[in-house]
Image (tube, rainbow, N blue to C red):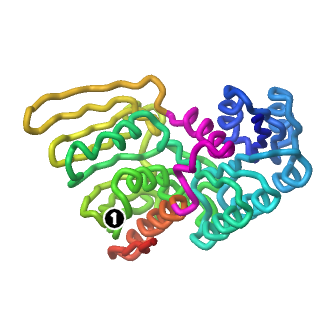
């Protein structure tokens, strides 16, 4: 089955185009971006039709599926329109600015019977899949520590509270989702932070927080502004299980080294991966979902839960109080 895809938004959408282009059985049929020159350049490269507007693309292009890679404030309108026109949706994170927006997107895709896959690419990354597959053998995860601080971002929508929401929403969504993937649903958060590292942008740009999960695991997380794009080891995960310690480190959003230590034996093992972005796995998984071969591993419910965690962290920073998270069925 050949799948005709479109990509709306050619920021991170450029990466979607690159990955689709590598996969067999995919035709890149359309692209949309308000920057005409950028859209026309991408269209020429991939043999697609260029549009200036995502809704125009959805109305006119012959497509089976679409990647929506625009700022989050536009996600609800575009995703609902895509679903209502019968197109499968790969939606970049964060899912939307509000939980109500997330619900509207999920409901539209459910009603239309189309695939909705959230762009949480870490779920396909080899190091995290390795952890997920083996952690049941390591005992209960008691505590964990995560560092996830990104470099400077100079985009107004990224910081807008009604759009990207800043790094604790836009980027840290990956961490919130991966923690839920590994540890289950969270119960509450307590955070301290501020905007010392991005004072002109927002009141909450960075935070250190604790997250208690319903199963009992406690996580400390340092996230938000404060990293440097030139610093290689800018992401670090340490998970302490009953019988083993696991440490993942590497470049931001691309950890590539896992060291495990069995506590009783004192033995240490190290694994390395060459490709850890999760991009190839995400795109091939989306196509498998469209063809009915797999079920989405990052759903609308996952997108909403990650957003709720980010909003709770920011609320805790602003109020100085712990914040309980919603419980989902």
Residue 30 is situated, as x and y percent measured from the top left of the image, at 83, 40
Does the magenta run of residues contain 294? yes
Report whether residue 156 is seen: no
Q: Position of residue 271 (x, y in %)?
A: 31, 26
Residue 300 lies, with reference to residue 271, above or below; the image says below
Disc 1 crowd, CA 10 A, few/some/many (<14, 14-19, 20+):
some
What percent of the width, then of the height, locates residue 260?
23, 34
Quadrant (top left/top right/bottom left/bottom right) for the C terminus: bottom left
The reply to whether the magenta stretch includes residue 112 is no
Residue visible at 40% across and 46% down in the picture: 148
The image quarter containing residue 216 is bottom left
User: Can residue 104 be seen at all in this image of the molecule?
Assistant: yes
Residue in view at x 88 percent, y 53 percent: 56
Start and end of the magenta stretch? Answer: 277-301
Quick check: 113 left or right of 186? right
Circle 1 sits in a helix, a strand or a loop, which is it? Answer: strand
Residue that numbered label 1 is attached to: 192
Is residue 286 or residue 150 the one in the foreground? 286
| Residue 9 higher or lower than 24, as above or below | below
- Residue at left 25%, top 39%? 246
Q: Residue at x 74, y 33 (%)?
A: 26
Number of numbered discs overlaid on the protein picture: 1
Left or right of 90, for residue 128: left
Quarter the N terminus occupies: top right
Drawn side of residue 107 relative to residue 279, left or right: right
Q: Is residue 185 above or below residue 19?
A: below
The vertical placement of 76 against 233, above or below, is below
Give the image location of residue 301, x and y in percent: 53, 63
């Amino acid at each position: 089955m050949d799948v005709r895809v479109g990509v709306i938004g050619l920021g991170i959408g450029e990466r979607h185009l690159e990955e689709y282009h590598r996969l067999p059985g995919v035709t890149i049929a359309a692209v949309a971006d308000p920057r005409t020159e950028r859209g026309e350049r991408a269209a020429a490269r991939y043999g697609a039709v260029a549009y200036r507007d995502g809704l125009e693309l959805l109305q006119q292009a012959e497509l089976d599926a679409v990647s929506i890679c625009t700022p989050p404030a536009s996600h609800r309108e575009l995703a609902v329109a895509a679903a209502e026109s019968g197109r499968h949706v790969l939606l970049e994170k964060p899912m939307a600015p509000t939980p109500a927006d997330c619900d509207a997107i999920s409901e539209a895709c459910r009603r239309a019977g189309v695939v909705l896959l959230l762009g949480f690419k870490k779920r396909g990354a080899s190091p995290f899949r390795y952890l997920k597959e083996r952690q049941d053998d390591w005992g209960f995860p008691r505590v964990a520590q995560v560092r996830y601080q990104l470099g400077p971002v100079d985009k107004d929508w990224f910081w807008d509270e009604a759009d990207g929401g800043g790094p604790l929403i836009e980027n840290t969504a990956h961490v919130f989702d991966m923690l839920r993937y590994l540890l289950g649903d969270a119960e509450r958060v307590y955070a301290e932070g501020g905007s010392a590292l991005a004072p002109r942008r927002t009141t909450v740009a960075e935070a250190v927080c604790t997250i208690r999960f319903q199963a009992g695991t406690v996580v400390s997380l340092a996230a938000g502004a404060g990293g440097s794009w030139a610093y290689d080891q800018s992401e670090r995960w340490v998970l302490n299980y009953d019988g083993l310690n696991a440490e993942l480190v590497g470049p931001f959003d691309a950890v590539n080294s896992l060291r495990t230590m069995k506590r009783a034996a004192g033995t240490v093992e190290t694994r390395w991966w060459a490709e850890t972005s999760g991009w190839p796995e995400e795109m091939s998984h989306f196509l498998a979902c469209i063809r009915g071969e797999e079920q989405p591993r990052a759903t609308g419910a996952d997108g909403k839960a990650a957003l709720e965690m980010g909003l709770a962290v920011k609320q805790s920073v602003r109020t100085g109080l712990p914040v309980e998270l919603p419980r989902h069925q």
